[in-house]
Amino acid sequence: MHAANLILFIHLLITCYLLGMIWLVQRVHYPAFRYVDRVQFTEFAEFHGRSISWIVAPAMLLELLTGIALILTHLNWLWSLNLLSILLLWCITFFWSVPCHQKLAQGFTHRAWTSLIHSNAWRTALWSLRAFALSGFVFVELSP
């Protein structure tokens, strides 16, 4: 397999991994926050932050790096759009979702929790769109 196609394949795989993670978090994990005992919620939120970071952060970084590599290897406006969508995900994550987590780490509030779910809904939609589009790109790119 050509190196550029390998990068493309890795990029698609990591995006699909993140898609699965984001759907699980959106449909199961974040809604379950409301059932955590309020006395123990701060401890839970700290545990969540530490634990999820090890699962998601390396994948997001790899997605970003392979997204940059795709621009360098494919020189196509679609890959610039791809990278812009990754950067948008990073902005939503660090300027909306992370502050929600920081507020929740101080104690559960309905406002911070619903804001987190809303920010994650945008991330879920964007990763879903990315995975769908990337699947098409890969099909076209790897077709004989």
Image: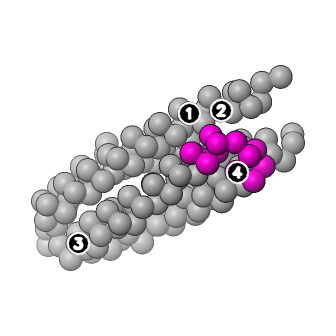
Q: Residue 132: horizontal and vertical position, in percent?
A: 53, 32
Marks 4 and 2, how far apart at CA: 13 Å
Q: Residue 4: horizontal and vertical position, in percent?
A: 80, 46
Mark 1 vs 3: CB contact within 8 A? no
Indicate which disc, 4 or 3, sits on the residue closer to the N terminus.
4
Residue 93 disc label:
none
Which label lies toward us, 4 or 3? 4
Q: Which residue is mark 3?
A: 103
In this view, 65 is above or below 134: below
- Horizontal arrangement in the rendering, residue 17 relative to residue 92 (left or right): right
The stretch in magenta equals 71-82
Marks 2 and 1, how far apart at CA: 6 Å
Q: Quadrant of the C terminus?
A: top right
Question: Element under label 2?
Answer: helix
Q: Which residue is mark 1?
A: 133
Q: 8 or 88, which is in the foreground?
A: 88
Marks 1 and 3, how far apart at CA: 34 Å
In this view, 63 is above or below 136: below
Q: How many marks?
A: 4
Mark 2 vs 1: CB contact within 8 A? yes
Q: 68 or 34, which is in the foreground?
A: 68
How packed mark 4 is, by other alpha carbons closer than 10 Å (few <14, some 14-19, many 20 or more), is some
Q: Which residue corresponds to the image point at 46% horizontal and 66% vertical from the top-left?
A: 53
Mark 4 vs 3: CB contact within 8 A? no
Is 86 magenta? The answer is no
Which label lies toward us, 1 or 3? 1
Amino acid on which disc 1 is placed: Ala
